[in-house]
Amino acid sequence: MTAPGADDIRLESLTLLDPDVSDCPYAAYQALRDDAPVWRDNATGMFVVTRYEDVKSVLLDTERFTSARHRGRVDPRSARLRKIYEDKGWVPGATLASRDDPEHREMRGLFNHAFRPAKIKELDPFIERLAHRLIDAFIERGSCDWVREFAIPLPLIVIGRQMGAPEEDIWQIKAWTDAWVQRLGMMQTEEEAIWSTEQEIAAQHYFQPIFERLREQPDDTLLSDLVNTVIPEWGRPLTDNELHAEMMADTFVGGSETTTNALAEGIRLLIDNPSEWAKVKNDPDTYVPLLAEEVLRLEGPVQGLFRTAAVDVEMHGVTIPAGSVVNVRYAAANRDDRQFECPADMNLDRENLRSHLAFGFGTHHCLGAPLARRELVIGFRAFVDRVDEMWFEPEVNDFRHHPNFCLRALKQLRIGFRPSR
């Protein structure tokens, strides 16, 4: 079946919650950029911003477009879910991403300390050993499910190590984070949302004893820093409720999903683009870092996140009323032909490929971006060094993505390959 083009999109009935649109959103993004750069989604009522310069301007304008404004909204479903947290676990506190300055700046200082460059750089040898160990498990077989056997475990084991979770628990943690991601994706029934909430509470009960141990016996992990470091302006460290929110949003999900999704899409794109694979294989020192950036641009692991209009704002002749939720669509901006020449093409030689917005922009730029980039470069390089040729396994890939309003994640990628000798 041929993917729809922009001319096939009907804006009067379009919603980004449509699972088929979620699976292949790029024609819809083009139609929106060209004909409705500020558009009200027919199902959610959110105002969706899709052009590169507009996305940047919204992200930079923290006075008119706030991150914290919508926190107080409680619909009936949210109220029922909150009661489950109250009865069985911890009501998640406000995350870093859902705060405005000065709270955001003060809290981010804690994360900047925990994720400082020297600390991240120390992880390189561990990531390299892990990447090759994962490849060792399937290299002689000549085939693998790249998503399940490499793209998921690499970043999850790395962040697990820094969060005090042993490697044997990563698949249980992955089940919990998957449940959290499904709720973030806004495509659940109420029963499914209740299930996701209860899964998150199970994760809370797993991590609570770790928090308590680290308060008694601090160590050199990132989590120990987060648990014990006092935020000077607040005069205290994070509470249990704040820590539980961060474990899902900014550490395990933020610290693994972006890398997992980009690792998966990168190999798919290289098989689809043999000329780019040849560049990477012939000169990995130059092209592996560029591969990481071009994958993030082309197949943004985070398709879009949210702001709230603090006042009435007019853009492109559309009035966004105060209080409206604005969906800032990074992935649409990253394929804007006003910014990127032939934006749908993979081109590792494009001059401005590092100007993508996959990690956001401005004050809320993703704090985990340096770690994600290290994992992508090391992970791709390990595979490039170990494989001479690769292909899609016949008749087993449908290349479908998990339905999700916010994230883009391949379900599986079955590949065959010829190992380097």
Image (tube, helix red, strand yellow):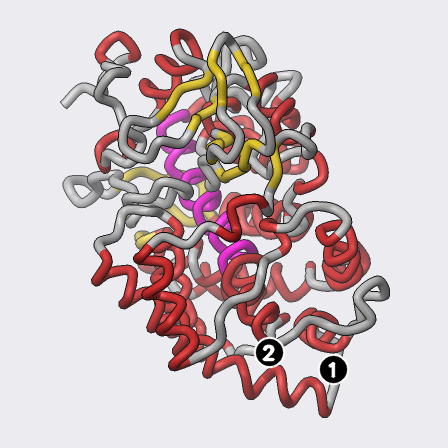
Depth check: give the residue in front, 294 or 110: 110
> Visible in this render: residue 285?
yes
**Residue under label 1:** 219
Q: Is 231 or 378 nearer to us in this picture?
A: 231
Whether 277 is among the magenta residues is no
**Distance CA(mark 1)–CA(mark 2):** 10 Å
Residue 378, image x, y percentages:
60, 50
Type of amino acid under label 2: Gly
Is residue 138 positioned above or below 265 on the image? below
Residue drawn at point x = 57 percent, y = 57 percent:
250
Residue closest to the far right:
232
Give neighbour class at mark 2: few <14, some 14-19, many 20+ (Cα, 10 Å).
some
Q: Is residue 240 left or right of residue 258?
A: right
Between 103 and 18, the residue placed more toward the observer is: 103
* Callouts 1 and 2 close, C-beta under 8 Å: yes
Q: Quadrant of the N terminus?
A: top left
* Left or right for 403, reference 55: left
Secondary structure character of the magenta stretch overall = helix
Please say whether residue 266 is one of the residues in the magenta stretch.
yes
Q: Secondary structure at mark 2?
A: loop
Q: Name the residue: 38% across, 68% down.
A: 176
Judge whether 285 appears above or below 259 on screen: above
Q: State the extent of the magenta-drawn residues as a range.
A: 253-273
Task: Specify the label residue 336 is tagged with.
Answer: none
Pinpoint residue 184: horizontal percent, then vertical percent: 40, 51
Pinpoint residue 114: horizontal percent, then vertical percent. 75, 63
Residue located at (61% from left, 23% from top): 353
Disc ID at residue 164: 2
